[in-house]
Image: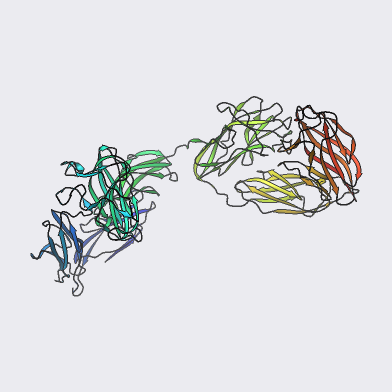
Amino acid sequence: MTVSGTAVDSDGVLGTYLKVDSFTYSNIGTTTFNKILTLAPGAHVLKIYAFDGQANSSATNTRNVSVVISGPDDTPPVITITKPSQAITVSSLGSFRVYGTVSDDKSGVEGIYLDVNSAGFVKIGTTVFDTNLTLLDGTTNSLKLFAQDISNNCTATNIYTVIIDSSYISPNWDFETWPEPYWPGTYPQNWTNGIMTNGVWWAVSFTSVGQSAPDAGYGGTGYAVVLEENSGIPWMWNKSELAVTPGDYIVIRFYAKMTIGTPKVATYAAFYSDTNQTGYIGRQWGATITLDSTWKEIKSVYQIGAGTNYVFMGIEGYYSTGTFLADNVTFGKVSDLDAGNPSVTITSPTNNFSTGVGMVDVTGTSSDDIAVKTVYTAIGSVTNSTTVNTANWSIALDASSIAPNTYQLLAWSEDYTGKKSSVASQNITLTNVPFPTVNLVQYDFEGETSIPNYSNPNTSNSSMESSDGTVTYPAGISPTPLDSISENGWPLDTSWGNYFIFKVIPTNYSINLKNLIFSLSRSSTGPLNYQVEVNGMFVPGASGTVLETWKTITNDLSALSNLSYIVVKICANSATSTFGTFRIDNVTLSGVITTNSIVSDSSNPNIAITAPADNYTNLVGTLINVTGTSSDDWGVDKVYAVLGTVTNTLSAGLANWVTTFDTSLFSAGDYTLSTWALDYAGKISTLATHSITLTNPPGIPEVTLIQYILDGEINRASYTNSGTSNSIITNIGGTVSYPAGISPTTLDSISANGWPLDSSWTDYFIFNVYPISGLLDLTYLSFNGYRSTTGPKNYKIVVNGVDVSGASGTVPTSAGWFSNTFSIATNLPYAQIQIFANSASNISGTFRIDNVTLKGKLIP
């Protein structure tokens, strides 16, 4: 007959259990069940209940059924004999067990009958049988069994041969008997000293093997084997093989304790495709256990892989010296050995435990007659499990998604045959507690590094960077005074275009910010003000003045919550010199890691140009102001705008952006204005483009002919007007190098030494400009200059071999850069520009220039 139905519960159904008559309950499903029963004729009682995720049981539903035979019974019963196998050799000197079950689908089972050595059949049971036989050592015995139903239908007679041999080592040993020839000489008859693979012996013997004193065995009774090992790799190897099928689970288990030294032991298994240790496939060790004076269970469970048909086991001593006892060895297929259900207990938390919503650590014990495979735990709808290797287990349950309430904490275990324990339960109360404030990232810059010295394991953090990429590491402030991070080139006005920047990306959960703490100071000409920006927005109150002495600032960022990404900028402005520096040290960002899942960056950013309009026309030599909008679900990091060969990069964050192009750098013609946005996750928008036409004003416009900014140690022109060609800029008379330059291109300048010590004009920087057609009308030359303390004191400008009137003077001292602009009103077929210098006080003295710009008109 079929038993079927459904079970429903808002907390989930862990199991539905059925009991037939006086048998124990068994699990037949969860929310649905469909179980086919074979029942003997007559009246039967069926009971069923369900068990939910809160350890609540439904009422027990009872059904009374009656099985009536329909039609004639001409089918014999079915007999299932668990033991013995068809032919078996055992070493037992006491009782030999015969057991199994019988079923019949019509009239029912009348009995099961056993004959031992033709002494006559004796009834030993009905639907279940289990009997012990006393058989003599050295005998071969014939066992016959058959079953009969109430209608007198009989099964065929099952015949078994059982050989009793006390010298045989079966897959289970307790070492209680030790007579010759069972244990001749040093090594047992049915164990081998080693095994050979590919002609190499890789199993060596124990130093000695012997029998223990009486009552020294496991549990304080009987005997154990005494094994002495040296510092090599000894083990005791079982000569008897176990036949297996791929997919089987096998168990190797024994108990051991130290008697001398510090011996280490482990289980050992070798796998073969064929019998008698042929067709070697591989080997495995269990965990290595260091023994002490107490008995320890040493156990491993292996699942048989493809191609393996036979297994040998061993007790291994692993690279240690000492003597130990071993007893109660079990080796076999779990399905053959496992007879009972596992058990489980919860040791912590205790019953009625109260804790905050979040992680709950659960510990306990589990046991089984063979081995526990898995322990499961549950609180409400949250479950977790662990594979068990020892009697003690530990599982972390993430209960952060569960509402505060009182729940049942549940635990149950499962063995390798699928049998489950009863459910252990404890009451547990989850309460609302404030999440702790933790440090997310710290930077102390010690060792001249911008990498964080601390990163919270729940976040991914970037290095500290500057907006133009050039930093130094001067002395810092206690408690990490060795280094800080510093930068120059800060705005001379009140704009916030320069900054230090770092990023914090949560791994799993969003973050509520708490504080940003850092120390700051400036040089005498450094920026006067600072402002903190997070995710493109200035934080109210997170601003102030910067002093020449160190001070530590705590910036309250608690208004910023539920962040899936964090980009922090420490901006500064109002410097009195581009050489003025701003430094920070001991930066710490703190916050609360919530249980809210982070919102992933699901889309690319968007960008649009609002001005100028598409197909815009403008005059060469004027400024074009470009405005637009940008947006992103995570936030826009940068906006890029390109006109011709000029690229402007904006640190965005706000919805509206603006940038300017100086068209004096361009020739008349048609251009494409291209813009795109980059978000904090590195995703790029599609291009937004407008067409722009530049026309010459009445008359011939002044344009930039050539520029050298020299960053990247490149002495080629960084800009060349399309109406000209040009040469590199180089030096005649000295050795060229590329030291730091001056804003806005601070990375490199061009420098040379070897300048004349007298007033002769023999050494110079030089570059050439050639019009593609027509003539050049030069209007002015500008550059920044700087000398070392022993560098040249005088300079002059020469064009095409002629001194430029008024374009000469004294080079300032090494206190700082100077800047000069010289008018050069001449009409030339080409221009060779030479910047001479002399009157150095040492040939090692240097003179450097940067940001060289030549402007003029292209005469048709």
The percent coordinates of residue 332 (x first, y second) are 26, 55
User: Who's the residue at 17% across and 43% down the image?
Assistant: 221
Q: Nearer the viewer, residue 219 or 760?
A: 760
User: Who's the residue at 20% across and 52% down the image?
Assistant: 189
Residue 357 is left or right of residue 754, and the answer is left
The percent coordinates of residue 496 (x first, y second) are 69, 37
Residue 847 is left or right of residue 203, and the answer is right
Q: Classify the position of the N terminus by image quarter.
A: bottom left
Residue 770 seen: yes
Which residue sits furthest left? Answer: 119
Residue 111 seen: no
* Image-quadrant location for residue 345: top left
User: Who's the residue at 55% across and 49% down the image?
Assistant: 600
* Image-quadrant location for residue 32: bottom left
Q: Nearer the viewer, residue 525 or 497?
A: 525
Residue 517 is left or right of residue 98, and the answer is right
The percent coordinates of residue 806 (x first, y second) are 89, 33
